[in-house]
Image: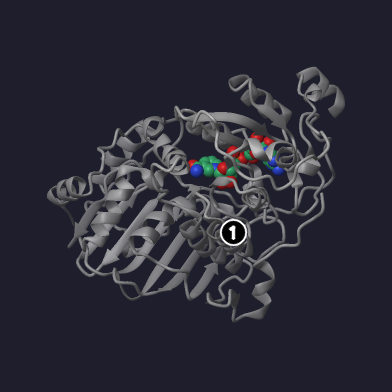
């Protein structure tokens, strides 16, 4: 079955998806019944979660759905039969920019900026998945445009609005471990690929528009299992590796808590670049200028890939003699959290997380849905009174310890902010700095074991050869 036949059969082809452009750069409007009218770009996998959690807000009306995969588009349309559907986000804006108030971008990373910038050009508020962009230049452009246009923005780091992360921020800023001089953060996930590019070409599945999927990025022959869905994360042309994936979540709390700006130096210990996939294992060391919560400077070490983190004395937990391992497979998030909490009592480091090292002890922040733990002189310290005090003082709502119940908070905060009733906690002004930091570590992977020096004011490296990776050539598509 060819693409045209597939589209006909699925009923999507009959909807005028590729209709000719009409109105460009229409102004954002407000819905007559006070509802926020949303358009969703990318509605499979995380996009489906984003669609569910945005549309669970009583004052949202989903008016447009866009995906380059007709199967995903069809599934979303079943849930929102009144919404118009599109394959190409450019056509979406041409056709109905004046009927949309906010846009949710949940595509692979390389399409975040092209789609979000077009949305903002059309004066739409934007919720964009993490990492904010694929290139440093794009993060800066998105921040600038959002600011100039006074738009409401939020990056999709939903755990930012979870209790334990907000609490950890308050504990650090309250001085629970004194001034922080080092942070270790780790994830053993493997969004790297050390192999050669695949040979040959597979037929593009009939439901996928491969040209639109590639968008502004490099053209590559379609190959099953390498790109769509999900595996694009491993590839330099489309994703940002494990650092860009899990790093954004795990960096977020320390970044926020320590009020960090972008780093001064970055070094990535990893294999030599191969121009195709990100290294499977990365150890990235950053040095940041000091803030009121840190020493004169702050050292930050990120470990990713299978086997990470490597043993470091800062990461040894009280009672760490156990050989018991938590089986991370086939567990619900809630079961895993409770197994990890028990294993932590016996000295096992949580699978993913961050450890802050300060002048008055260490603070362990597991990723995620677990309380931060203070460690001093090799022992856990009871900080329940501090937790109670800060929870009360800042009116934090108690955690449900249920992901599905807590995740919508971040999305609803965005909707409420668009409706003038709240403020976003991860706007692009914050997200752009955090993403820039992450992307600098990703670029450092092109220069293994070399320290790069970042000039934030002029947005360039002292090492001239690294500057070519700050922006990309957009392909016409
Ligand atoms: N916040 C989180 O916890 C979280 C979790 C997972 C993924 N993500 C982020 O969400 C984004 C998507 O990740 P995923 O795992 O769902 O990827 P995926 O490849 O599984 O799904 C992407 C979806 O976007 C569609 N798409 C691709 N290109 C498009 C385009 N040009 N226009 C419209 N639709 C397009 C695909 O067909 C698919 O439906 C990524 O940026 C990822 O980092 C965030």
Left or right relative to 407: residue 398: left
Residue at x-position 30% and y-position 46%:
164
Q: Position of residue 435 (x, y in %)?
A: 52, 59
Residue at the (67%, 40%) spot, across then down: 97
List x then y, in percent, for residue 331: 42, 31
Reply above or below: 416 against 149: above
Q: Quadrant of residue 196?
A: bottom right
Q: Quadrant of the N terminus?
A: top right
Query: Please, which residue is most extreme toward the left here?
Result: 385
Q: Is residue 416 above or below residue 11?
A: below
Q: Nearer the viewer, residue 328 or 439?
A: 439
- The answer to whether residue 215 is visible is yes
Q: Secondary structure at mark 1?
A: helix
Please rate how many residues cluster around mark 1, counting C-alpha atoms within 10 Å: few if below 14, some from 14 to 19, many from 20. Answer: some
The image position of residue 462, as x and y in percent, is 59, 81
Q: Is residue 177 above or below residue 212?
A: below
Return the residue nearer the eye: 72 or 14.
14
Q: Quadrant of ligand 1?
A: top right
The type of colouring in the image is one colour
> Where is mark 1, residue-wise?
145
Front residue of 47 and 377 = 47
- Say which residue appears at 25% left-offset and 45% top-offset: 346
């Amino acid at each position: 079955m060819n693409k045209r036949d597939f589209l006909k059969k699925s009923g999507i082809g009959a909807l005028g998806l590729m209709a000719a452009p009409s109105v460009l750069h229409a102004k954002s409007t407000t819905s007559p019944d006070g509802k926020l009218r949303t358009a969703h770009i990318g509605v499979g996998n995380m996009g489906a979660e984003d669609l569910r959690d945005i549309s669970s807000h009583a004052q949202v009306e989903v008016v447009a759905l866009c995906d380059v995969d007709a199967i995903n588009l069809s599934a979303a349309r079943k849930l929102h039969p009144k919404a118009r559907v599109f394959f190409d986000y450019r056509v979406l804006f041409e056709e109905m920019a004046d009927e949309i108030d906010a846009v949710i971008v949940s595509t692979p990373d390389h399409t975040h900026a092209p789609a979000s910038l077009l949305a903002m050009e059309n004066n739409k508020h934007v919720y964009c998945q993490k990492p904010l962009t694929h290139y440093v230049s794009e993060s800066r452009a998105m921040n600038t445009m959002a600011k100039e246009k006074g738009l409401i923005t939020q990056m999709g780091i939903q755990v930012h609005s979870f209790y334990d992360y907000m609490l950890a921020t308050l504990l650090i800023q309250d001085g629970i471990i004194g001034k922080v001089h080092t942070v270790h953060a780790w994830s053993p996930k493997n969004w790297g690929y050390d192999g050669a590019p695949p040979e040959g070409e597979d037929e593009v599945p009939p439901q996928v528009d491969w040209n639109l999927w590639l968008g502004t990025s490099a053209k590559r022959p379609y190959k099953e299992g390498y790109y769509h869905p999900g595996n694009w994360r491993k590839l330099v042309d489309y994703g940002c590796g494990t650092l860009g994936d899990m790093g954004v979540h795990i960096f977020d709390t320390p970044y926020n808590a320590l009020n960090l700006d972008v780093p001064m130096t970055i070094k990535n210990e990893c294999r030599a670049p191969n121009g195709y996939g990100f290294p499977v294992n990365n150890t990235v060391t950053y040095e940041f200028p000091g803030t009121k919560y840190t020493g004169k400077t702050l050292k930050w070490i990120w470990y990713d890939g299978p086997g990470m983190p490597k043993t470091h004395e800062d990461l040894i937990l009280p009672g760490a003699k156990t050989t018991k391992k938590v089986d991370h497979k086939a567990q619900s998030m809630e079961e895993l959290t409770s197994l990890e909490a028990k294993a932590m009592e016996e000295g096992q480091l949580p699978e993913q997380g961050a450890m802050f090292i300060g002048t008055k002890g260490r603070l362990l922040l597991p990723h995620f849905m677990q309380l931060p733990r203070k460690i001093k002189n090799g022992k856990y310290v009871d900080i329940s009174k501090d937790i109670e005090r800060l929870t009360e003082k800042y009116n934090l709502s108690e955690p449900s310890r249920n992901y599905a119940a807590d995740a919508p908070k971040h999305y609803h905060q965005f909707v409420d902010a668009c409706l003038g009733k709240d403020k976003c906690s991860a706007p692009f002004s914050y997200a752009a700095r955090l993403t820039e930091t992450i992307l600098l570590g990703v670029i450092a992977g092109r220069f293994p074991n070399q320290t790069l020096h970042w000039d934030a004011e002029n947005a360039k490296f002292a090492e001239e050869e690294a500057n070519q990776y700050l922006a990309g050539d957009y392909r016409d598509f």
